[in-house]
Amino acid sequence: MGEVLIMYQGKEQGFTLIELMYVVIIISILSATSFQSFVLYMEKAEFSKAEADLHNSILSVQQGELDVPATYSIAYSLTGQDGGKIDGPMATILPHAKTSKGVQIGVSYSSCATALDTTPAVIISSEACKINKKIVWTRFCGGLVTRVTNDASPGCS
């Protein structure tokens, strides 16, 4: 059986080098912009975890203050960044509080001598360790509450 080869006569088919270069350039531009969007999305997600942990800690403090002795105080203490239930002296102030993985909570607590006292009664900080952003919530004895967001020192301790 004989095979018949049909040769295409005319212009060759295929992509030129310039066309392939254009495709590579377009793909690299698209991937660069999508990577930046992905990084921003991940930073927002990490910061949202820190905000959620701060909110839960504030609620936990409000619940825990009902059972705290009148003269109780703790110096500024930090949790680890492994996540989980808060224990130790901070558990007295933050009963039932938990942290997310990669978020470090710091707490300082002192009882108010009088309602006119202007010292900070409760300071709670929540730091997203991967992106080095910190939120600090402070309640003063007179009732004033402040909330500050800033860049933290590199890496959680």
Image (cartoon, helix red, strand yellow):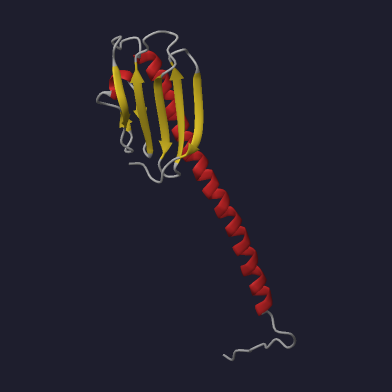
Looking at this view, name the residue that lies furthest to the bottom: 2
Q: Residue at x 45, y 9 (%)?
A: 116
Left/right of residue 11 with respect to residue 100 in the rendered view: right
Q: Residue at x 26, y 23 (%)?
A: 89
Q: Position of residue 137 (x, y in %)?
A: 46, 25
Q: In the rendered view of the protein, which quadrant contains the N terminus? A: bottom right
Front-lying residue, 151 or 44: 151
Q: Quadrant of residue 30?
A: bottom right
**Residue 87 vertical position relative to residue 9 in the rendered view, above or below:** above
Q: Residue at x 42, y 24 (%)?
A: 56
Q: Position of residue 13 (x, y in %)?
A: 69, 80
Q: Quadrant of residue 130?
A: top left
Front-lying residue, 156 or 42: 156
Q: In the rendered view of the protein, which quadrant contains the C terminus? A: top left
Front-lying residue, 117 or 133: 117
**Residue 47 vertical position relative to residue 24 in the rendered view, above or below:** above
Q: Residue at x 32, y 19 (%)?
A: 93
Q: Quadrant of residue 79?
A: top left
Residue 95 visible, this orientation: no
Looking at this view, name the residue that lies furthest to the left: 88
Left/right of residue 40 with respect to residue 79 in the rendered view: right
